[in-house]
């Protein structure tokens, strides 16, 4: 099986395993950022070689294993550079020189800084990283899933406990994931698709702390912002058959209930 070496190498990150020409001596020992990046590049090259002769089912498995493996490696790079990342916004010439130098190095491996907000900076793969590698090899459900994730990741979604895209755009994302869930009911990705779908529904209804849909939440004075009511009405008129409409109606009727989140969560499980 083409995915065995990748799966085995990262099933236990503390165990020495071989991934093709890339040898994982021990991810638990101290490694430099350059060494970790070399592993990122080596693993990508091996994956691309395996895909060239893989069936679609095998390509799907390679994607699943590679996603986990690459996340481990990127996580190790974040740990390796955590002191610099913590100082990312400091106006010190030497620090900014190091930030620029590391950024250029990351770019060579299709990685980039991830400015999350509240002063937190991490490292991530570029938005189209997995789409570029897998789109010509995987099954249709995987292909659409990866493409959607790639497209959505082009813009930042949240920072400082606030949504960075409009509620209308979140509504449209709900429909995208709703269609994926309906189109591929037996997909191995079903749980991931469902989780993302429900996450968008929750954000659409409640917002986040600094972009809440409800003012004076938890009190009798509570009310839903007018722009959100208008958006709910737009959504229901545009997508009258969407299962999300049931959640919207329950939310509009019960938003003052202190257990409204539990109520919505319960209803989501029925969709």
Image (cartoon, rainbow, N blue to C red):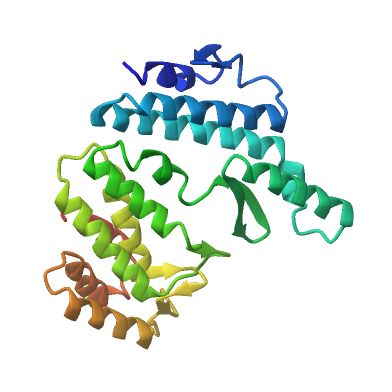
Q: Residue 137 appears in which quarter of the rendering?
A: top left
Q: Residue at x 24, y 64 (%)?
A: 175
Q: Is residue 4 above or below residue 228?
A: above
In the displayed orientation, state which residue is furthest to the right. 93
Left or right of 181 in this view: 95: right
Q: In the picture shown, does residue 12 fall above or below 242?
A: above
Instruction: List the single residue furthest toward the bottom.
Output: 226
207 or 79, which lies in front? 79
Q: Looking at the image, which residue sits at the far front?
A: 52
Q: Position of residue 230 (x, y in %)?
A: 30, 86
Q: Is residue 139 left or right of residue 146?
A: left
Please determine whether, in this image, residue 164 is positioned above or below residue 64: below
Where is the C terminus found, in terms of image quarters?
bottom left
Residue 258, image x, y percentages:
34, 68
Relative placement, left or right, of 142 versus 37 is left
Quadrant (top left/top right/bottom left/bottom right) for the N terminus: top left
Query: Residue placed at 30% from the left, 59% from the top?
Result: 262
Q: Which sits in the foreground, 214 or 205?
A: 205
């Amino acid at each position: 099986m083409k995915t065995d070496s990748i799966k085995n190498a990262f099933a236990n990150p503390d165990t020495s395993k071989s991934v093709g020409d890339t040898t994982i001596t021990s991810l638990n020992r101290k490694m430099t950022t350059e060494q970790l990046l070399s592993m990122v590049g080596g693993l990508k090259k091996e994956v691309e070689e395996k895909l060239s002769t893989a069936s679609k089912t095998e390509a799907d498995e390679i994607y699943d294993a590679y996603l986990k493996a690459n996340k481990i490696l990127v996580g190790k790079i974040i740990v390796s550079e955590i002191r610099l990342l913590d100082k990312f916004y400091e106006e010190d010439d030497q620090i900014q020189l190091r930030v620029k130098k590391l950024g250029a190095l990351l770019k060579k491996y299709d990685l980039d800084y991830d400015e999350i907000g509240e002063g937190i900076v991490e490292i991530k793969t570029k938005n189209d990283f997995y789409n570029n590698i897998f789109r010509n090899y995987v099954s249709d459900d995987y292909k659409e899933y990866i493409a959607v994730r790639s497209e959505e990741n082009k813009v930042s979604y949240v920072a400082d406990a606030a949504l960075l895209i409009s509620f209308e755009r979140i509504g449209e994302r709900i429909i995208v994931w709703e269609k994926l869930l309906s189109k591929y009911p037996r997909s191995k990705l079903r749980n991931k698709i469902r989780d993302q779908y429900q996450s968008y529904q929750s954000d659409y209804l409640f917002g986040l702390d600094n972009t809440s849909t409800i003012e004076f939440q938890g009190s009798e004075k509570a009310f839903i912002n007018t722009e959100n009511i208008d958006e709910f009405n737009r959504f229901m008129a545009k997508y009258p058959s969407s299962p999300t409409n049931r959640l919207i109606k329950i939310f509009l009727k019960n938003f003052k209930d202190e257990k409204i989140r539990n109520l919505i969560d319960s209803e989501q499980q029925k969709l």
